[in-house]
Image (cartoon, rainbow, N blue to C red):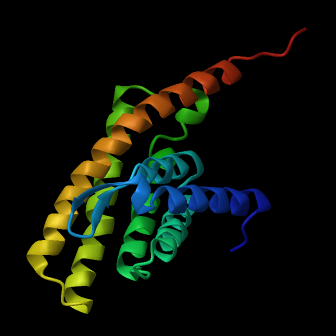
Amino acid sequence: MTLSAKTVVLIAIGAALYGIGGLPMFGIPVFANTTLKPAMAVLALFGVLFGPLVGFLVGFIGHWVTDLFAGWGVWLTWVLGSGIVGLLIGLYPKITKDRLDKGKFNKLDFTLFVFLAFLGNVVGYGCSAYLDSVLYAEPFVKVMAQLSIIAAGNTLLIAIVGHFILTAVAKRKQQSYNLKEAD
């Protein structure tokens, strides 16, 4: 598999934005070792705009960067979870047959976006919670509480920010899509 220079740059930019935006100073602490991060919107948007591979790598590398700079060590289980979130949200363009690129973003598209965000959070961070319980002997009740809070909070955050940004992207794409060559 080869990645174009553009894709590598997109991954680097997305991972940096997600990684720095995921630091505790930018988040809202909600539970034991659990923070709602506005950077989740960055992960979702990179996944939606550039596909599952970019989404996965932005989440994986970006979460790794967050953990490195936050000083609590790299939690590979949660790094993997963020990658899975980006991957699942990144399926959006394939499922919608690239309607956003054609300037289309309706209520059904938004509902699908929110569903993928929720599914990504439940599956991705569900894997993280399960692996924490098995590998690190974290209490199952604690990791399930973390999962529930993060899945709901991240989905709400992604839905709100994503709605405004994807509506603007669709409007911009619609203007470009409607341009015709002059005679």
Q: Is residue 122 visible?
A: yes
Quadrant in which the N terminus appears:
bottom right
Residue nearest the observer in this picture, 122 or 35: 35
Work out whether 81 lies above or below 173. below
Write the residue at 45% across / 77% down.
71
Residue in view at x 25 percent, y 82 percent: 132
Give the left or right position of residue 162, taking residue 14 as reference: left
Q: Is residue 131 above or below residue 181?
A: below
Q: Is residue 168 left or right of residue 11?
A: left
From the image, which quarter does the C terminus lie in?
Answer: top right
- Would you identify the image quadrant in which residue 30 lies? bottom left
Is residue 91 visible in the rendered image? The answer is: no
Q: Nearer the viewer, residue 36 or 125?
A: 36
**Residue pushed farthest left?**
141
Spot occupied by residue 68 in the image (x, y as percentages of width and height)? 50, 76
Count of all numbered marks drawn on residues in the image: 0
Q: Farthest residue toward the right? A: 183
Seen in the picture, residue 6 relative to 108 is either above or below; the reply is below
Q: Quadrant of residue 128?
A: bottom left
Determine the residue positioned at 55% across, 67% down. Answer: 57
Q: Position of residue 148 (x, y in %)?
A: 17, 59
- Residue 174 lies in quadrant: top right
Q: In the rendered view, tell whether residue 141 sits above or below residue 48.
A: below
* Residue 51: percent from left, percent from top: 55, 54
